[in-house]
Amino acid sequence: MRFSFLALPLLVAGPALSLTADEVLQATYDGGALPDGQSGLTLTVQVLLDRAGVSPGVIDGYKGGMSESALRGFEEQAGLPVDGIMDAEVWAKLARDGAAPVLAEYVVTAEDVSGLTESIPDNVREKSEMAELGYTRVSERLAERFHMDEDVLKALNPDAQFVEGETLMVADPGAPLEGEAARIEIRKGAQRAVVYDGSDAIIANYPVAIGSDETPSPSGAVEVTAVAMDPTYSYNPEVNFEADGVKEALTLPPGPNGPVGTVWIDLSKPTYGLHGTDTPAKLFIHQSHGCVRFANWDVEELAHMVSQGVAVEFVE
């Protein structure tokens, strides 16, 4: 199981502070490409893509690399010309008649506000001494549950205290997909994982982070050997890499803020897997030491569609 914090020289959007629920709910498509920057229309499109089984990654309302790659994935799935640009044909298939509003009300529960982790240290040895690498804020927990950027959740609810009984406006990405995966393509260039069923139809499409040139992801075909929910993480500098100057092997506890997130899907190539991440907004920025990272909610969905023996092909 491998992870790193290498960054590509790409620009990322700053915190979302101005987007309002009204702007999202009133968004309409009048033609042309999505507007630059952040908009209620882009957030709407992101939610509709998520419902269609083509994950935009973190729902943040920003036009960017993950949104463009998701549009390409949807166009491929829908049999449209693939260019990653919003147009009337894409909108017509996404926003079908009767589509539910992309935002919904959610009442914060007692469970939502309990069991938080006070803080998470940076050092790998200190992490290994913890009981759980859990959520540190209610807003963080709920943002992941609804596939959202935490700053966007706060922007849509500017007066929220995130306490039990409070009603929030959240993204409504729909119920998790159900299906049975027959094979998965990890498309390195596109940074997408495309899931096919037994009839070779696309049933899901997710953004991912892959290995760097120095520590590449595998090539060719491997297969799923096991699935672990809420996995621990085995840190072994003699096998993988050294972090924080720690030279002994350690076991890090489970949790969404652990280095492999909430799921580990083991592959037949030793030490490699498909797994979650503690930084879903940075999937298109960070690179791994060879494994394939997903947003926690995406790999949780995938985990229920795969079984031992499912083929995983790495495509250059």
Image: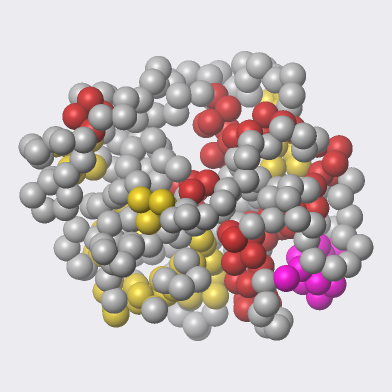
Whether residue 151 is situated above or below residue 228 in the rendered picture: above
Q: Quadrant of residue 92?
A: bottom right
Q: Is residue 173 magenta?
A: no
Q: At 44% across and 28% down in the image, what residue appears?
A: 135
Residue 31, percent from left and from top:
88, 67
Q: At 17% across and 49% down in the image, what residue appears?
A: 241
Magenta stretch in the rendered image:
85-97
Q: Quadrant of residue 123?
A: top left
Q: At 50% across and 71% down in the image, what residue appears?
A: 190
Q: Is residue 116 visible?
A: yes
Residue 298, percent from left and from top:
49, 53
Residue 155, percent from left and from top:
72, 31
The answer to which of 270 and 18 lies nearer the viewer is 18
Q: Name the side, left or right, on which 97 lies relative to 166.
A: right
Outermost front residue: 9
Whether residue 86 is situated above or below residue 230 in the rendered picture: below
Split into 4 quadrants, where in the image is the C terminus? bottom left
